[in-house]
Amino acid sequence: MASTSSQKTSEDVEDTEEDLKKLVSENKEEEEVGECSSEEGSKEQTTTGQKKLLPPTIRIGVCRCVQCSSENVYWTCKTCCQYTMFCQKCARKARHPHTMKRFRESDRSTFLLQRHLQLVYYNHIVSCDREICLEPCLKQREYRVHFDTCPCRPRSVHDIIVDGQVRFDGTGFTHEDCVDCGLYITCLFLHANDCKAEQCPAQWCNEMREVFDMDSKQIWMISDEMKKKVKDVIIEEWKKVRERQQVILVRGIVDDLLALTV
């Protein structure tokens, strides 16, 4: 019956909302915007006879020129959006294929909010298979498929560890690998840090928990102010989910009534 299916969908939505609230509210650490670091990555702790690495600390980086790393960002790509920013000097010689627009100071706060939201959404899509969910989740699940098929990404967790250090820069790798896969691996760390499943179906989760001591610390550094902004956006997104859910529920009831009249 359609009503039974709708009831199950409602329960799934509520479960997912609780997961997201947990993700954005658990961390009580103070954030200072910078790069993801693994300054403690070379330290090891012994658990059950096996040495485990400390996981990297994830911070959202400041706005930087993609070529010289200058913080004096002047131009940003209208197509690539947050991935491509240039200082004035590098913009002149970049020969970027897309139209660029002036990067205003007010764009920085918007950019940082988008980056934090992106981590929340990516962390969510790591394991979500619900039919009715957040719009960003439904749109971005392709990145999970991309990660399975991308020839440029590391093939295992061990490929991003060099001399006990994690080769990571916040939302990707420190060299020319796939940016999307780098961001997705960041969110796999976030997922693995909270996952308690004995055997998790999410990519790399079991391996990450075997290699890294995920109970050693909370890895995502986010300020209280940014945390509130993220939660406000997520709440509004869930309102849209409930609206779609109600529409489907009503349609199901109508279909059931029509079926009785046939």
Image (cartoon, rainbow, N blue to C red):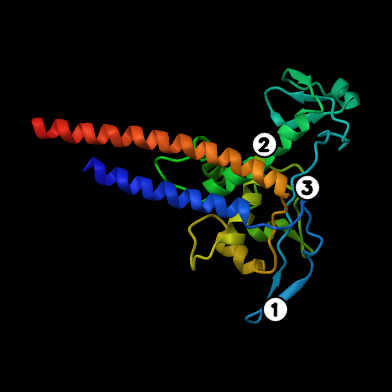
Q: Nearer the viewer, mark 3 or mark 1?
A: 1
Please name which of the two marks, 1 or 2, marks the residue nearer to the observer: 2
Q: Residue furthest left?
A: 262
Residue topped by disc 1: 46
Residue 90 image offset from top left, x and y in percent: 88, 26
Examine the rendering and report whether any part of residue 199 can be seen: yes
* Looking at the image, residue 192 lies above or below residue 171: below
Specify which label sits upstream in the sequence, 2 or 3: 2
Identify the residue shown where x is 89% and y is 24%: 88
Residue 26 or residue 150, whichever sits in front: 26
Residue 126 is left or right of residue 84, and the answer is: left
Q: Residue at 84%, 34% (x, y): give it.
A: 67
Outermost right residue: 89
Answer left or right for 134 relative to 105: left
Picture coordinates of residue 107 (x, y %)? 76, 28
Q: Quadrant of the C terminus?
A: top left
**Amino acid at dot 1:** Thr
Q: Amino acid at mark 3?
A: Thr
**Disc 3: which residue:** 174
Secondary structure beneath disc 2?
A: helix
Residue 89's tag is none
Q: Are marks 2 and 3 in contact (CB under 8 Å)?
A: no
